Amino acid sequence: MKIQVAGPGCPRCQMTEKNVFDACAELNLAADISHITDRKQIQELGVWTTPAVIVDGKIVVSGRIPSVPELKKFFADTGKAS
Amino acid sequence: MEWGAYLVFLLQSGLGGLASYLAAHVLLCLLPAFFIAGGLSALVPKDAITRLLGRNAPKVIAYPSAAMAGSVLAVCSCTIVPLFAGIYSKGAGLGPAITFLFFAPAGNILALAYTGVALGGDFALARVVLSLTFGIGIGLIMALIFSRDDQAHAEAADTGFVGGEGLTSRTVLFLVLMVGLLVFGTLQVRLLLNSYASFTIPVDGLDRAQDFLFRLVPFDAAKGEEGVSVQGAILIGLLLLIGFSAWRGLGRVHEGYNRWTWVSLGLIGLTLLVAAVRIEPRARGLDVAISGKAFGVLLTMSVLAFMARKYFDAYEIQQWLWETWRFVRQIFPLLVVGVFAVGIIRQLIRPEWVQAVAGANTIFGNLAGVVFGVFMYFPTLVEVPIAKMFLSLGMHPGPLIAYLMADPELSLQSILITASIIGRIKAWTYVGWVALFSMISGLLYGQWMDGASPVILTTCLAGFLIVLTGSLYAIGRRKEAVVRGVEVKEVGRG
């Protein structure tokens, strides 16, 4: 699974990244996590409001900090679908 | 005067300005305003608004929504840039993006509350109405001038929308109540100012303390300066305590509530209450009068606390408090430094200079206001104490509004960032229009303040807007026809 966190490096984005890591750890998920900070790249992903979390190319959260349980649900759902 | 003494005098007037600001204005307006900003940032799903800014949104919806996005989502400039880029490149296009960019600095809750309390409700109202009207106007003009480019851009962009939940009624109610708290705290009406009960706390020597404070922070009422009262001193003390406890309580609230969280929340409630009652130091003790304001503040705070417990889960409240603290930490230190600096600079500027340049509502005066706004860069909200300084030094309200319109919208820094997103030609065209419109706003507002009939002014403004819209519409139709001849447009638009 490919998980991308998009955000220009603000404190909210760092917190999102931390929550993503925590969620993966709790699920024992070996995911490819990257943090995208480049504005152009963020735009190309179709993200308007940061922080955003993108799972396998699909934006699941945008403009707010997702909680760990919420992220776990997203990751589990995507895991099942693929 | 000797240099050393002069330096002490300058420092004293800086500190005096700071102290009277913290004591008098800031509390009842900025404290709730920061909480509202935090709430908007943490609790309002951004999709609810950005959804209205899609590529296919009709103009009637896109422009007002862009303005709304400006006031609701973009509380600080760090959110403005990505959102602006998003609206421009993936969403409704150049016009609404410009409206958003223009309205955001003037229409957000912090700027509004602060302007209203420091400069007066009429300035706040003028700022909102003028920047809303002209924000949409400039957006439409820009969209029209560059309509060809925008069309090409639309082809390249795709809509990357996430479906999300909308605004829930509990969030709306929660935010409305906080706005109510702000209004109760700042509105000067009889019902709220009347005292309904009073008691005396017997403490000796407070009248001497008051004298001491007035001597410590000298002020000149004729210049519009304010001294620090005993109540003000108590409030400043409470603010310091809040700062300390919030650092440990709210700064780490995302890891869970701790004892400091409750301490700081309690202190904030107490501070708002102390600021809402009227305190008079007497020889025998402290007279405390409970005004309608205090009742209002207490009632709204209780309802808010109840709602927070009952209708929001712990995670949401944590996010809210964290965001609020983040805003405070980001904006407040700069504001403190700014107010301090303004207190010093005030002594260095001669009123005659300001009056000579912008003492009357002339084209030159308004232009001076705009130019000063463009070339000076002040952090968020610092434009307000600066405007207040100019006002007390004798600047006419017209040029002052011109300055207030131009300063947050345009600074060399923001022009450069904007240019990197929409291109240099568009950015400078935007700057030109903003300068022009800021000047017109200043002239109109100045005329109004000078006693010109509001009917005539409204007619002038309406006439100007009608001519503008009319010609834009006519040019737009012609351009659209040309574009249509070249390429087949989407079905269902015409």
Image (tube, rainbow, N blue to C red):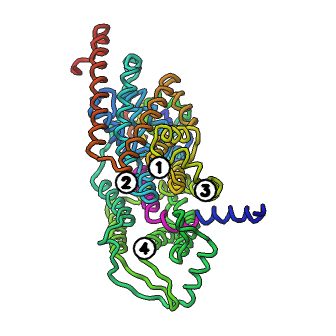
Identify the amino acid type marked 3: Arg
Quarter of the figure that contains the C terminus of chain B: top left
Tell me, yes or no, whether the highlighted magenta stretch contains residue B25: yes
Could you tell me which residue is drawn at 48 percent across and 85 percent down?
A: B286
Q: Chain of mark 4?
A: B
- Where residue B129 appears, x then y in whole percent? 34, 45
| Residue identifier under label 2 | B122
Tell me the amino acid under the disc marked 2: Asp
Q: Residue B448 has which mark?
A: none
Q: Nearer the viewer, mark 1 or mark 2?
A: 1
On screen, B332 above or below A39?
below
Q: How packed is label 2: few (under 14 Cα within 10 Å), some, or many (20 or more)?
A: few
Q: CA distance from mark 1 to mark 2?
A: 14 Å
Say which of marks 2 and 4 sits in front. Answer: 2
Give the side of residue A78 with respect to residue B482, left or right.
right
Region of the chain picked out in magenta, as a range? B18-42
Q: Distance from label 2 to label 4 (Cα)?
A: 26 Å
Q: The disc numbered 1 marks a residue on which chain? A: B
Kind of residue at badge 4:
Leu
Mark pair 4, 3: CA separation:
32 Å
Label 3: chain?
Answer: B
Q: Which residue matches tag 1?
A: B396
Mark 4 or 3, closer to the camera: 3
Q: Three-letter amino acid code at disc 1?
A: His
Secondary structure type for disc 4: helix
Q: Is residue B188 above or below residue B46?
A: below
Pick whichever of labels 3 and 1 is earlier in the sequence: 3
Q: Are marks 2 and 4 on the same chain?
A: yes
Is residue A55 something that shows in the picture? Answer: no
| Numbered circle sitting on residue B273 | 4
Q: Tell if the residue under mark 4 belongs to the same chain as the one under mark 3.
A: yes
